[in-house]
Image (cartoon, rainbow, N blue to C red):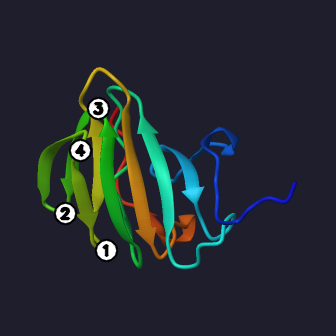
Amino acid sequence: MTKQKYLSHYREIEPFITKDGSVIRELMHPGSHGVEKQSLAEARLPAGRKTLLHRHHHTEELYYITQGQGRMTLGDESFEVRAGDGICISPGTPHCIENTGQEELALLCCCSPAYSHEDTEILGSMLA
């Protein structure tokens, strides 16, 4: 059977750890699918964990929380987030997210241009 570049199946996508420390599944990415200018990933963060403070020089990100609750740091601001919340992260803005709940924190992350390790600059260390 020919692999379709416009369709992905969650169960077939291998997770990996990004530079910020979160576990990611690339649901759609130019390296594997027919998209050209963006990527869509699911990120998961265990209870009590926090991603590394980082920024992307060229990429705009959209986070959509699908499960759990946490604390988002975005530039100089810090605020609570929970399932159903969306966050826009402008290029160059330092950010990280902490799982403050008892269950796994899950979010969808849309990046334009598509996510790349090369566009990710680590600014801080993991606290938990």
The mark tally for this picture is: 4
Foreground label between 2 and 4: 4
| Quadrant in which the N terminus is drawn | bottom right
Q: Is residue 110 left or right of residue 6?
A: left
Residue 75 has which mark? 2
Foreground label between 4 and 3: 4
Let me know if residue 21 appears in the view: no
Which amino acid lies under the numbered mark 1 shown in the image of this protein?
Gly
Which amino acid lies under the numbered mark 3 shown in the image of this protein?
Gly
In the image, farthest residue toward the top: 102
Q: Which residue is mark 4?
A: 84
Evaluate if marks 3 and 1 touch, with contact meaning CB atoms under 8 Å apart. Answer: no
| Quadrant in which the C terminus is drawn | top left
Q: Which residue is mark 3?
A: 68
Query: What is the secondary structure assignment of the residue under circle 4?
Result: loop
Alpha carbon separation for disc pair 4 and 3: 10 Å
Query: What is the secondary structure assignment of the residue under circle 2?
Result: loop
Alpha carbon separation for disc pair 2 and 4: 22 Å
Q: Which residue is mark 1?
A: 92
Query: What is the secondary structure assignment of the residue under circle 1?
Result: loop
Alpha carbon separation for disc pair 2 and 1: 9 Å
Density class for disc 2 (Cα within 10 Å; few <14, some 14-19, many ≥20) is some
Q: Is residue 17 above or below residue 7?
A: above
Residue 95: percent from left, percent from top: 28, 57
Which residue is drawn at the image coordinates 32% and 27% (left, top)? 48
N-terminal-most mark, 2 or 1: 2
Q: Is residue 95 above or below residue 46?
A: below
